[in-house]
Amino acid sequence: MRGIVFLDRDGTLIEDVGYLRDPAAVRILPGAAGACRFLSRERFLLAVVSNQAGLAKGRFTAEEMEAVHRAFLAAFEAEEVVFDAVEYCPHHPEGEVEAYRRGCGCRKPGTGMAEEILRRLRVPDSCPRFLVGDKMSDISMGIRLGAATVLVGTGYGNREKVLGERSGVAPDAFLPGMREAARWIASHGSGS
């Protein structure tokens, strides 16, 4: 294993359509499946970490979220990509659905989802960590984890880059999409 790559879902791996509730609307972004296959071949673990506050906000039900999750996994499996772990955070402190209305340590930029994956997969502390996302909350989570971070220009990436520059938070790299991010990670991973 050369490292673990934490991947945001919406805007990084699939099209960001807002609060995704229809499984038929899952669309893999160009180059994302090939990038994941490449990283797997290069011996990187792939872990998806995704905020899904739409559940707390009442924008979709748990059943709809699960159906989208199954469609997401099936779309990538059809492209010969199997993720080593997938975690979602359904919480939001201002949610309308009481069961999910709370602050938590798993919602990005919190590191709870990633820490759970590291424990479950028994990833050693010495293992290189990478984070790819389209929002500064992704980048902030990666920084807190001690990961090398890549902000991609897909999804909200271009807008978020400007926000990050204003706030003084910067990724290690800003790249057009997953294809370029995968090459960057492979060139920076252990054993390269």
Image (cartoon, rainbow, N blue to C red):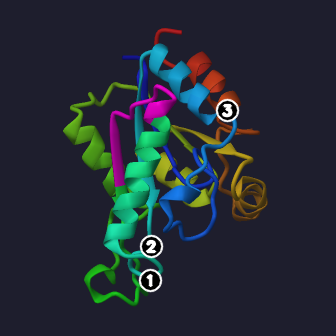
Picture residue at 71% right of the left edge, 53% below the top? 157
> Is 89 placed above or below 126 here?
below
Does the magenta segment cover residue 82?
yes
Report crowding for label 1: few under 14, some 14 to 19, many 20 or more residues within 10 A (C-alpha): many
Q: How far apart are marks 2 and 3 (CA)?
A: 26 Å
- Which comes sooner in the sequence, label 1 or label 3? 3
Per the image, the residue denoted by label 2 is: 53
Counting residues from the N terminus, which is met first, the one under dot 2 or under dot 3? 3
Dot 3: what SS?
loop
Tell me, for residue 57, which label it has, or none.
1
Circles 2 and 3: CB atoms closer than 8 Å: no
From the image, tell me which residue sits under label 3: 31
Answer whether residue 107 is magenta in the image. Answer: no
Q: Using the image, tell me which numbered label, if any, was put on residue 133.
A: none
**Tag 2 and tag 1, C-beta contact below 8 Å:** yes
139 horizontally vs 161: left or right: left
On the image, the x and y values in percent for residue 174 come to: 73, 41
Residue range (magenta): 77-87
The residue at 25%/83% (across/down) is 99
Inter-mark Cα distance, 1 to 3: 31 Å
When asked about the image quadrant of residue 3, the answer is top left
